[in-house]
Image (cartoon, rainbow, N blue to C red):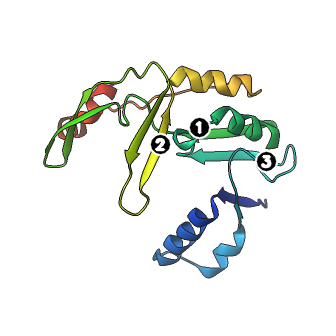
């Protein structure tokens, strides 16, 4: 069976991804032609209605101020019965509090934000990218957002960690204990 793969992101991110891929030991030049690179923003997708059987979005929604528009666009370009899988930062995990201490590789945050409510958090990501805004949403808001955009059979799953060694090593994961 044949398939068409499309990578859609901001043009600068596509260039960075391609550069990283070319540095991989498993890189094969002929594989590059199997993926169509398309640049743009998530709220205005340049694809026909019902173009895709499957789509995967990784770490987009916490950057998006108008996430409702993105879910509407994704629903528009998905074929009926298609699958759309999303990963994003869980609001209880990412920037859910003020930094307190660092012990080795473990950071301690004091929970100071009500993550049951939408949050806008301005942070300095790093020296290269600079200041950014994270738009954190309660888990249930994602479910509602996708359902209101027309998606069916919406399931939202939060991470669960059961590896006790990892939990002991990483205090910030303990809230996801199985």
Residue holding disc 1 = 65
Horizontal placement of 169 versus 41: left or right? left
- Residue name at image x 68 percent, y 28 percent: 146
- Viewer-nearest of labels 3 and 2? 2
Horizontal placement of 90 versus 58: left or right? left
- Viewer-nearest of labels 1 and 3? 1
Q: Which mark is residue 165?
A: none
Task: Say whether marks 1 and 3 touch (CB < 8 Å).
Answer: no
Residue count near mark 1 (Cα–Cα under 10 Å), binned few <14, some 14–19, many ≥20: some
In the image, is residue 130 above or below residue 176? below
In the image, residue 133 lies at what x, y percent? Answer: 47, 42
Q: How far separated are the C-alphas under marks 1 and 3?
A: 24 Å
The secondary element bearing badge 2 is classed as strand
* Farthest left residue in view: 103
Residue holding disc 2 = 133
In the image, is residue 58 above or below residue 176? below
- Residue name at image x 55 percent, y 20 percent: 140
In the image, is residue 122 above or below residue 110? below
Q: Which mark is residue 52?
A: 3
For the question of whether residue 164 can be seen, the reply is: no
Closer to the N terminus: mark 3 or mark 2?
A: 3
Q: How far separated are the C-alphas under marks 3 and 2?
A: 30 Å
Quarter of the picture containing the C terminus is: top left
Task: Say whether marks 1 and 2 touch (CB < 8 Å).
Answer: yes
The secondary element bearing badge 1 is classed as loop
Closer to the N terminus: mark 1 or mark 3?
A: 3
């Amino acid at each position: 069976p044949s398939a068409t793969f499309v990578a859609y992101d901001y043009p600068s991110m596509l260039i960075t991804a391609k550069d990283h891929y070319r540095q991989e030991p498993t890189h094969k030049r002929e594989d590059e032609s199997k993926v169509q690179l398309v640049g743009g923003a998530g709220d205005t997708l340049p694809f026909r209605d019902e173009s895709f059987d499957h789509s995967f979005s990784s770490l987009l929604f916490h950057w998006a101020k108008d996430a409702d528009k993105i879910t509407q666009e994704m629903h528009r370009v998905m074929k009926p019965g298609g699958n759309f899988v999303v990963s994003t930062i869980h609001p209880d995990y990412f920037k859910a509090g003020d930094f307190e201490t660092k012990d080795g590789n473990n950071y301690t945050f004091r929970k100071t934000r009500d993550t049951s409510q939408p949050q806008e958090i301005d942070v300095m990501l790093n020296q290269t990218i600079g200041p950014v805004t994270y738009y954190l949403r309660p888990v249930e808001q994602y479910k509602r957002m996708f359902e209101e955009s027309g998606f069916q059979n919406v399931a939202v799953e939060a991470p669960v960690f059961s590896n006790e060694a990892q939990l002991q090593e990483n205090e910030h994961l303990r809230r996801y204990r199985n």
